[in-house]
Amino acid sequence: MIRTHLRLLTLILTVFGSVAMAQPPAEPLSLWYRQPARQWVEALAVGNGRLGAMVFGGVAQERIQLNEDTLWAGGPYDPANPDALEAWPKVRELIFAGRYRDAQNLISQKMMAKPLTQMPYQCVGDLSLEFPDANGVTDYRRDLNLDTAVATVAYTIDGVRYTREVFSSPVDQVIVVRLKADKPGKVAFTAGMKTRQKASVTVESPNTLVMQGVNGGASGIAGALKYQARVAVAAVGGRIVPGDGRITVTGADSAVLLVAAATSYKSFKDVTGDPEALAKETIANAGGKSFDALLKDHVAAHQKLFHRVMLDLGTTPAAERPTDERIRDPNKENDPQLAALYFQFGRYLLISSSRPGCQPANLQGIWNESMNPPWQSKYTININTEMNYWPAEPTNLGECVEPLVAMVTDLTETGARTAKTMYNAGGWVTHHNTDLWRASAPIDGPQWGMWPTGGAWLCLHLWDHYDYSRDKEYLARVYPAMKGAAQFFLDTLVEDPNHKWLVTCPSLSPENPHPFGSSVCAGPTMDMQILRDLFTNCIRAAEILDVDEEFRKRAAATRERLAPNQIGSAGQLQEWLEDWDMKAPERHHRHVSHLYGLYPSDQIHVRTTPDLAAAVRKSLEIRGDDATGWGIGWRLNLWARLHDGEHAYKILEMLLRPERTYPNLFDAHPPFQIDGNFGGVSGIGEMLLQSCAGEIDLLPALPKAWPSGSVQGLRARGGFELDIQWKNGKLVNVTVRSLAGGPCRLRYGAVTRDVNLPSGQSAQWDGVK
Ligand code: FUC
């Protein structure tokens, strides 16, 4: 209704005004703008998990910046430092003697990776399209339709309506660009490519641009990859004229460009692929299909995942405005649809950056224009990579976890080498980062890198994928990786002389300095929580698979001896073994690592451990609400888990402000880092449904700002799918469908309902009794 009125108003203004103003796109799940992107964080992202593009939408010149997810610097390498083994006992002695700075210095000299930094994720380059007609533009709009995963640019010049559509097909493995005009013979442009890689651009007559190159080295590791990108141009009507590194089209009715790219990367230890053959074959296959068929297959593959969850938080007139205006000004008008759009945009990003068979979503997903991006756009696994995958299971995108599982499987190999070389331990270990080559040794410097618990945290995702699907064959496949992660700690945990608990050492509470001139310490709270989960999940898995009785006993006995969660003198949850929190130099630190126990874990829960939950609340209050993008994202999930909907909403509003969200809805750390987008999605999900501590909690943190709404298709542990509807702040109805068969307990406030459903069946509840 509101939409119709506004359209009418715009139409009247258009007719009586001098310049035609673009109207909002028909699909409400769209990002849209009235001007081309001037900077990268205004451009629109498309991706098929492997091939990414940023579409700028210029009128005189289109820039389509390209990525391929295996184009990183370097080649296979092993950074584990053999000097570590000898230094390790000494480091432990220094830490237990309270000589933290000395320990840090020794780690710096003897235990860090060689080289000290990992390899950067890089870009392929740009496809540029230059257009002869660019003056007198009216009615300009560019948009990204999240429902179809197509970016569109449209404008009028001299009465001719020009349209440009771009999508990255997961089916045909090409980026497709179609240019058309609503009058015959009006499509004309020159296509070219450029890059900062060591590469050449040539034309293969009659119609193909070929960029051919090699990746660079970094930190002394030589580049070992070849790559190739090909752009095949086809036109209806008109002429295609090949030139020197450029292809010109004139007088066409429409044109379609197919972009393929590949590298020689086969795995972290094998770079013998043939990018030319791959790119050629891909273009040949896609070229055999019509544009309509390419589009239809692309949309179907996207919607198979995207359509599983629908979210309605209400719509106000603010939803008609261009996306950049809504972000710039989110608080002036009540705009609940912006949160729904952000939620679905995050799901769109996960689908577009992490499909089975691809690399996992890195710090920027797959979208990066730089040769040495911030933090190399790697996999930072002391929060960022995990946060990328927080929404995967609850928002019904379980398939998107596959690349992460595959990466963990690789890490069991490289991490076993690191465990042996550095610690002479069994199992496998990964420190706070990894890259395309699955490097697993501590990097950057002891105060960030000397943290052995990254791989153990990743294993939570392996377990969660089982817990949400109850797929036992899958569990059998990933169990060895989980067991290997646990094995490393069974071999390396040490008794702390003070309390006689078993602790990690050396380690740190991610990146947060304690009061003694370092962050290096023994047994930080987060490590203990992660290991408690790891051992618990290994034991559960071994029981389900009926294997490894001895190992189970050992894991259980070790778990009992881990340092417990402790409440400190300020009533806070202690971040370290000792009560150092109030003396630590960075009290408002962005990381909230020790609160892992509340989220993503459920060791701490408002219902089952109220005292510890109150201590988490205290810690959060001390830390403060403001942080980097992902720091805010984590706080959002934590406040939701504390069942404080108003506080969670306040944090969500902070995330949606221009300081934390760019015009193209990418999260601003700043700079762009995709984890905040994903943390935002899971946080919105946690406000509506929580599946933890043995129950499915409905609307546990519903804010007043969303009085009525509905969500369909959220997932819960045990293999359940739920549709929830609420009105005036109260649950109206929930439908729970069982996908795996078995019991669950639904909770709405103080009321619970036990349901036991055979697979494929559903039940309804109104939350009253
Ligand atoms: C961690 C964070 C930084 C940044 C980097 C990629 O080191 O502390 O804020 O997100 O990862």
Image (cartoon, rainbow, N blue to C red):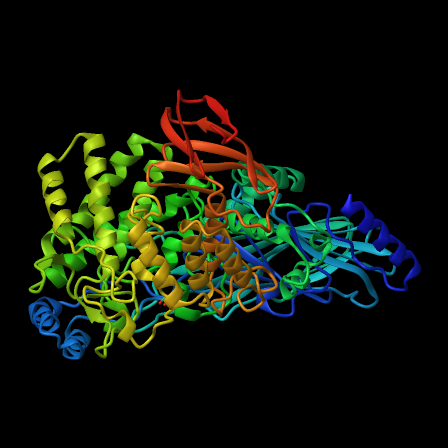
* Residue 436 relative to residue 428: left or right: right
Taking 724 as reference, is 604 above or below it?
A: below
Name the image quarter holding the N terminus: top right
Of residues 635 and 155, the one drawn nearer to the viewer in this rendering = 635
Could you say where residue 514 lies in the image, as x and y percent from the top left?
A: 25, 73
- Tell me which corner region of the image, top left, top right, bottom left or bottom right, holds residue 210: bottom right
Could you say where residue 245 lies in the image, as x and y percent from the top left?
A: 60, 65
Residue at 21% in and 41% down: 538
Q: Is residue 660 visible?
A: yes
Could you say where residue 122 lies in the image, as x and y percent from the top left?
A: 44, 65
Of residues 588 and 759, the one drawn nearer to the viewer in this rendering = 588
* Residue 645 relative to residue 187: left or right: left
Taking 515 as reference, is 483 above or below it?
A: above
Of residues 449 and 46, the one drawn nearer to the viewer in this rendering = 449
Q: Is residue 443 visible?
A: no
Could you say where residue 599 lies in the image, as x and y percent from the top left?
A: 36, 52
* Residue 186 relative to residue 406: left or right: right
Taking 419 as reference, is 285 above or below it?
A: above
Residue at 63% in and 50% down: 337
Taking 710 as reference, is 49 above or below it?
A: below
* Residue 634 relative to residue 190: left or right: left
Residue at 15% in and 32% down: 547
- Tell me which corner region of the image, top left, top right, bottom left or bottom right, holds residue 517: bottom left
Q: Ligand 1 sits in which quadrant?
A: bottom left
